[in-house]
Image: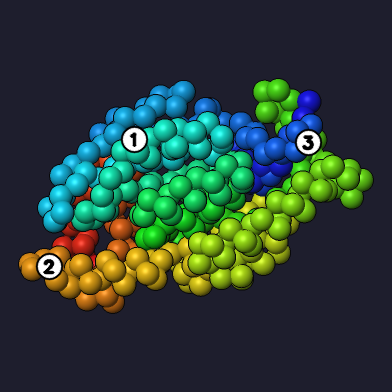
Amino acid sequence: MRFTLLLTFLIASLLSVVAHASVRTSALTVSLQTISPSPTVNMDKGVTARPPLANAVSEEKSESKPEGRVVVMAIKGQISKKVLESIRTSIGSVNSDPIPAGLIVLLDSPGGDGIAAMKIGEILRANKAHVFVTGQCASACIFVLASGVVRAAPAYTVGIHRGRITKSDANAKILEEIDVKTNPQAREMLERFEKAVPVYFAQMGMPPDLFQAMQSHQFKGVYRLSTEEITFYGLSGFEQNYLDARAQQFEKLQGPYHMDKDELHRRSLKVASRCAEFDQKHTAFINCYKQVLRDPFLN
């Protein structure tokens, strides 16, 4: 058996939700507690990869200058170290930032390994990822969402909560919840994790209120954010320096892509809701993203 600190949640038959956070206390490292089928990072041309992790790259020549390919990654299922390693292996495919993006990340995840999620976020931020929720993004998934230089999510698709300690077997089956008040090792891991989270959020430009909101929801379940809350907590928006540079690029363009900073911001944040239906058809998602940017009447 091992102790697990896992930021994730389970959907039961009556849609009741249980939130967790998991860590291996023997080595005091964070590990995924797999509750659903194996997680996947899909990078393909509309064909969803099957577990184990598959890495096919969706490429399309951009209509903008300089030309470059658009890489789409879809993170589905729980976030684990395997997902982290898959992204590390695949990130070299990103080599430019054309229109609509050099890297698009689509999220449909109940959460998972919080430390792995933050490491994924650091990689995605360094590669100027545009991150959109196309299904759900709960628990540890918000660390990935927060990393996007462009990020958006429809109302009530984002869920937050405070982590808790559980014990699992080798197959990641939850056996019992651990009381951190009586287990010093589990308490130490939880405290260390909770010190790391606000530092990570600050690096991603998130307001301190986001961590405070997570900590305030510490019972079993997740708190779903409204559109206004998603925006207030910074989980929908742009990284400011990226927005400034991107807006200058669009202002110089001719034709339907010509727009100012406010219009670019407004149109981009519509992509998650407008294009979510193409979450398994990545070329179609890219085309939808372009269409949302080109056509003001879609917004």
Residue 251, horizontal then vertical, whole percent: 17, 73
Question: Is the residue 198 above or below the residue 16 in the image?
Answer: below
Q: Residue furthest left?
A: 255
Q: Between residues 119 and 109, which one lies in front from this camera angle? A: 119
- Residue extending farthest to the right is 182
Identify residue for label 2: 253
Instruction: Tell me the kind of residue under disc 1.
Output: Met
Image quadrant in which you'd find residue 112: top right
Q: Is residue 39 left or right of residue 238?
A: right
Question: What is the three-letter code of the residue carrying label 2?
Answer: Leu
Is the image coloured rainbow, by chain, by secondary structure, or in one colour?
rainbow
Please give the label number shown on residue 43. 1
The kind of secondary structure element at disc 1 is loop
Camera-nearest label, 3 or 1: 3
- Quadrant where the N terminus lies? top right
Which numbered tag is attached to residue 198? Answer: none
Q: Residue at x 31, y 43 (%)?
A: 94
Q: Are marks 2 and 3 in contact (CB under 8 Å)?
A: no
**Dot 3: within a 10 Å radius of its alpha carbon, few (fewer than 14), some, or many (20 or more) residues?**
some
Q: How many numbered marks, from 0 up?
A: 3
Question: Where, by quadrant of the figure, is residue 110 drawn?
Answer: top right
Q: Residue 85: x percent and y percent? A: 49, 33
The answer to whether residue 290 shows anywhere in this view is yes
State how far apart marks 2 and 1 are (Cα).
Answer: 29 Å
Q: Earlier in the sequence, mark 2 or mark 1?
A: 1
Classed neighbour count for the residue bearing mark 2: other residues with Cα under 10 Å, few (<14), some (14–19), many (≥20): few
What amino acid does circle 3 point to? Thr
Q: Which residue does the numbered mark 3 point to in the structure image?
A: 25
Instruction: Give the Cα separation between the discs numbered 3 and 1.
Output: 33 Å
Q: Residue at x 71, y 56 (%)?
A: 194
Among the two numbered marks 2 and 3 on one chain, the one whose residue lies closer to the N terminus:
3
Q: CA distance from mark 2 to mark 3?
A: 54 Å
